[in-house]
Image (cartoon, rainbow, N blue to C red):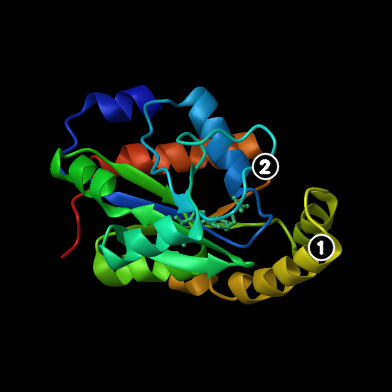
Amino acid sequence: MTFSEATAEPATSARLTVLSGPSGVGKGSVVERLRAHYPQVWLSVSATTRRPRPGEIDGVHYHFVDDAEFDRMVAAGEMLEWAEYAGNRYGTPRRPVLERLARGLPALLEIDLQGARQVRAAMPDTLLVFLAPPSWEELERRLVGRGTEDAQTIQRRLELARTELAAEPEFDVTIVNHSIEQATEELVRLIGSLARTPVKH
Ligand code: 5GP
């Protein structure tokens, strides 16, 4: 089944899909590939207090906000979930996701493990997808090799990644990230087939 075949059908049971997994596993790269090759896949844009990395665009990759604005969004109940991760806060604005689902259309979040758990608690029909590295050594190599963070940040992320790897059994589906292309295609197939799969209650 191709993606276009899957989406040609009415989305009678649109669902929320959460892509999560350890830091450095390639969630960001999968999402980048989705943006480039599968613009039909609707992705939530998170709010974050982290500073933009080179090339990141406000409103596209994240909504870059300051602490006060993040506080305001949380206090106003505007976040579907939020978490602190490696010293910064990240959250999913609730309204765009709920509007999307209300229109019968699928939605995808790429968030950390703490966020994935919150979404599952709030919306139990959510499909949780775990992106796994081919091996721990490979994950370590990717985390250290990214070159965008200082040594302390890398160390914090390695510790987090060890904890996050242990969470795999909490997820509905695992995709092993052998390559960005293969992992992205598996994810797209999964989202596409969800349009046909009745939601369990
Ligand atoms: P990065 O700073 O590398 O873009 O993201 C760091 C971590 O934050 C990643 O694991 C990413 O999945 C997670 N993240 C991004 N947006 C959100 C969000 O809205 N909520 C939560 N809980 N985590 C997020």
Image quadrant in which the N terminus is located: top left
**Image spot of residue 54 (x, y percent):** 70, 36
The secondary structure type at the circle numbered 2 is loop
The residue carrying mark 2 is 53
Picture coordinates of residue 159 (x, y %)? 72, 74
* Front-lying residue, 123 or 61: 61
Question: Which of the two discs, 1 and 2, labels the residue nearer the N terminus?
Answer: 2
- What residue sits right under mark 1 in the picture? 137
The residue most toward the front is 68
Name the residue: 47% across, 70% down: 114
Q: Is residue 173 visible?
A: no
- Left or right: residue 145 compared with residue 1: right
| Cβ of mark 2 under 8 A from ligand 1 | yes
Cβ of mark 1 under 8 Å from ligand 1: the answer is: no
Type of the residue with mark 1: Glu
What's the amino acid at mark 2?
A: Arg
